[in-house]
Image (cartoon, rainbow, N blue to C red):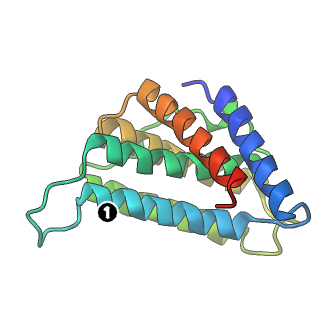
Amino acid sequence: MNLEKLYEIQGGLDAHIVNEQGLEEEWLFEEKVLALKVEIGELANETRCFKFWSRKPPSSKEVQLKEYVDGLHFFLSIAMDLDMDAESLQVICDYTRDTLTETFNDLYEYVAELRAISAVDIPATISLSDIHDTLHVAFSCFVGLGEKHLGFTWEEVQQAYYVKNLVNHKRQLTGY
């Protein structure tokens, strides 16, 4: 997994958005964490893993992959905002659980913990070590969810990320 190229691409998109929206002086951590939670929820909705009351099948792998890379965009953006380099984000442990539902629940908790750690006087008093560790665990869980539970290869994820990044740039150019 090589995140360097994705960092470079995400940094370009983030810089474009910040410049176009006049957000140069804004700390967007709260917004990005909420956006990440929403994207994780949209992915869970497409898997339908928690919908025990329904017989409708999950969305196609392609639809799930599109939702997955939306979450990847925000993980990368948050990591860069916290000055976490790509190497530090590399997955070294499996934080997934036996079921997709359990893994989604754990992922939500990790992202909530990420926000809780940083909730005091952002960004002045953040313990970067604690927040980097928590982000690493959350990201590792997210990557494991994609690989173990959804069957995505890293090559598929990267390719879908590149495609979605182009869509995001076009959206910014058209006043999305």
Residue situated furthest front in the rendering: 174
Name the residue that disc number 1 marks: 45
* Secondary structure of the residue carrying numbered label 1: helix
Residue situated in front as seen by the camera: 26 or 93: 26
Task: Reply above or below: 149 against 47.
Answer: above
Residue situated in front as seen by the camera: 95 or 147: 147
- The percent position of residue 16, horizontal first and vertical second, equals 79, 49
Quadrant of the rendering where the N terminus is positioned: top right
Note whether residue 113 is visible: no
Quadrant of the rendering where the C terminus is positioned: bottom right
- The percent position of residue 106, horizontal first and vertical second, equals 40, 60
Displayed quadrant of residue 120:
bottom right
Type of amino acid under label 1? Asn
Residue 124 located left or right of residue 112: right
Question: At 50% from the left edge and 42% from the top edge, which residue is drawn?
Answer: 140
Task: Reply above or below: 53 against 144.
Answer: below
- The percent position of residue 130, horizontal first and vertical second, equals 69, 55
Residue 104 located left or right of residue 73: left
Residue situated furthest left in the rendering: 55
Residue situated in front as seen by the camera: 133 or 14: 14
Note whether residue 137 is visible: yes
